[in-house]
Image (cartoon, helix red, strand yellow):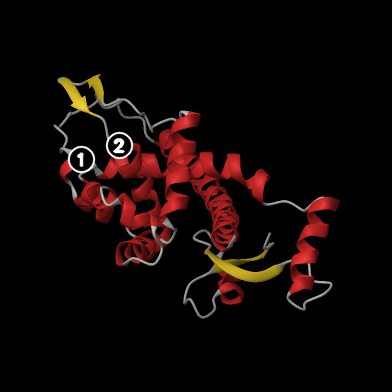
């Protein structure tokens, strides 16, 4: 019961955060497109020849530290073990939640997250990047704020691959999970929620609320002083209410 409540709370907060992140990404893309259009109007030079893509061999992901960590599945399943606690500290979610997320990605055939072992392209056959490695990379970036280059160094994935994969994941995650988990409860659900609070002496309560700060990278300069707090940078604050049943 505690684990289910914990997973629901994590999923709700993560859905809201990724939706906000996706919105900021859309604003940034729109701004970059406008800048590119202005540059194109001013630039009368001949178009540059297209650069030939260099396809480099990939590492054997089965031998990397994260793959060796996932081999300890029995220890990771037990939340009381050192390995499980370390996993949660590094990726900010419990191991069972990570497994459910990987299953969701595989079942939905998310773009950029192929389950094939090998791919054909470039100069020959290359080993595909495991879905588990990609999901862990996304969680590391979201949980600790690592740069794409940091994750590239640990996983063996190219920085451009990490960049592309991260934005593909967050866009799909926000689109699919936000309407499922971020919503008002129906009448029956509300009764169950209030019953849970009533049993612990909090009659009348229907949710637990807290605020989460999301960095506002495109905050107008005239509004920065109103949005900078203890974090030291401009943020938007979202109040998140979650149930416990």
The number of numbered discs placed on residues in the rendered structure image is: 2
In which quarter of the view is residue 219 placed?
Answer: bottom right
Q: Secondary structure at mark 1?
A: helix
Q: Position of residue 171 (x, y in %)?
A: 51, 41
> Which callout, 1 or 2, points at the residue further toward the start of the chain?
1
The residue lying at 59 percent from left, 39 percent from top is 176
Identify whether 223 is placed above or below 65: below
Q: Foreground residue, 190 or 167?
A: 190
* Image quadrant containing the N terminus: bottom right
Locate the C terminus and report the quarter of the image it occupies: bottom right
Query: Horizontal and vertical percent for residue 134?
Result: 34, 43
In the rendered image, is residue 160 in sight? yes
Query: In the picture shown, does residue 202 fall above or below 75?
Result: below
Answer whether labels 1 and 2 touch (C-beta < 8 Å): yes
- Closest to the observer: 198 or 89? 198
Residue identifier under label 1? 61
> Which of the pair 114/171 is nearer the observer?
114
77 or 105: nearer the eye? 77
Image side of residue 123 versus residue 172, left or right: left
Q: Is residue 112 left or right of residue 15?
A: left
Q: Marks 1 and 2, how far apart in space?
A: 7 Å
Residue 37 appearing in the image: no
Judge left or right: residue 192 versus residue 131. Answer: right
Q: Residues within 10 Å of mark 2 (few under 14, many from 20)?
A: some
User: Looking at the image, which residue is at 39% across and 32% down?
Assistant: 112
Label 1 packing within 10 angstroms: few (<14), some (14-19), many (20+): some
Measured from the top left, where is residue 113 in percent x and y? 38, 33
Looking at the image, which residue is at 36% across and 30% down? 44
Q: Helix, strand, or loop for circle 2?
A: loop
Tag 2 residue: 130
Compared to residue 106, the image places residue 94 above or below, namely below
Indicate which disc residue 158 carries: none
């Amino acid at each position: 019961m505690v684990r289910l409540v914990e997973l629901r709370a994590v999923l709700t907060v993560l859905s809201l955060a990724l939706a906000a992140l996706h919105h900021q990404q859309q604003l940034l893309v729109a701004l970059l497109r406008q800048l590119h259009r202005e540059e194109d109007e001013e630039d009368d030079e001949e178009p540059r020849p297209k650069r030939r893509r260099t396809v480099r061999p990939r590492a054997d992901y089965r031998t990397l530290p994260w793959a060796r960590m996932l081999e300890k599945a029995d220890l990771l399943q037990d939340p009381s073990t050192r390995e499980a606690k370390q996993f949660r500290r590094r990726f900010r979610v419990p191991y069972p939640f990570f497994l459910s997320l990987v299953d969701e990605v595989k079942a939905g055939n998310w773009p950029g997250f192929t389950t094939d072992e090998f791919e054909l392209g470039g100069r020959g056959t290359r080993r595909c990047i495991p879905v588990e490695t990609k999901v862990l990379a996304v969680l590391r970036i979201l949980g600790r704020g690592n740069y794409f280059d940091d994750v590239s160094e640990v996983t063996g994935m190219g920085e451009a691959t990490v960049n592309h994969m991260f934005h593909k994941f967050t866009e799909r995650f926000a689109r699919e999970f936000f309407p499922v988990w971020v919503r008002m409860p129906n009448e029956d659900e509300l009764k169950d929620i209030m019953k849970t609070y009533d049993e612990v002496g909090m009659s009348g309560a229907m949710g637990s609320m807290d605020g989460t700060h999301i960095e506002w990278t495109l905050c107008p300069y005239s509004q920065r002083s109103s949005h900078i707090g203890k974090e030291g940078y401009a943020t938007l604050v979202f109040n998140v209410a979650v149930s416990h049943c």
